[in-house]
Image (cartoon, rainbow, N blue to C red):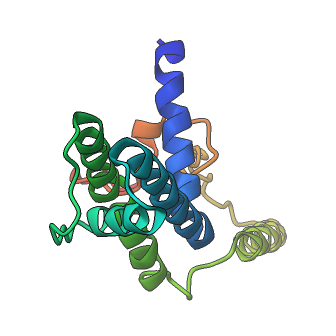
Amino acid sequence: MDVLLLPFRWIYRALVWFANSPRTLIISYLLMIVVAGVIYGQVENRTAADAVWWAVVTASTVGYGDISPVSWQGRALAALLISTMVLLVIPLITAHFASQLIVDDDAFEHDEQEELKADVRRMRALLEEIAARQGIELPDLPPERPVNGPGSAAPLWARSGRSSRRRPPP
């Protein structure tokens, strides 16, 4: 089953790579315009300037109508170019800019989290030492639960920290 999902994982990783870099998005857009323009120019016998103009107008889904394909190859290219832009490139650009707007600047960095965990361990050790001197018995710690974040061994469907179900208190 994993072998069947492998191509989809590659496609997903490629899309994530594209979406996380404005440079790759812009370069891929320009490359797509140039390639579509060259192919259109060959198929429809148009000049390079007309072909690139057609590619820009078609990719932006404006479609002025001043230049339009007449052959089935040109129409197929137009359908592919429009579909790619509407279903892939525009959503990736939108998602990238939206993710830049919702970045939490107050979120703890990994190093800060590790420092906090080490501080809690030191405080626990000091508390146990003080309790031993005073003859106080501390309650046992709850069993450590695995972290369900990125990079954990938990399956993807179990990693979500958000759920509509209420979890029982620890």
Among the 4 quarters of the image, the one containing residue 134: bottom right
Horizontal relation, residue 115 to residue 169: left or right: right
The residue at the far bottom in this view is 106
The answer to whether residue 32 is visible is yes
> Which of 49/9 is in front?
49
Q: Residue at x 23, y 63 (%)?
A: 67
State the image coordinates of residue 90 (x, y, percent, origin top left): 34, 65
* Residue 123, placed above or below residue 18: below
- Residue 148 visible in this rendered orientation of the protein: no
Q: Tag count in the figure?
A: 0
In this view, the residue in front, 84 or 12, is 84
- Residue 133 is situated, as x and y percent measured from the top left of the image, at 84, 71
**Residue sitting at 57 percent across and 80 percent down?**
107
Q: Where is residue 56 shown, x and y percent of the image?
A: 36, 68
Residue under the point 73% across and 77% down: 112
Which sits in the foreground, 150 or 15?
15
The image shows residue 69 at horizontal and vertical percentages of 23, 50
When the figure is inspected, residue 60 is found, relative to residue 83, above or below; the finding is below
Q: Please tell me which residue is depicted at 63% across the width and 78% down the height of the picture.
A: 108
Quarter the C terminus occupies: bottom left
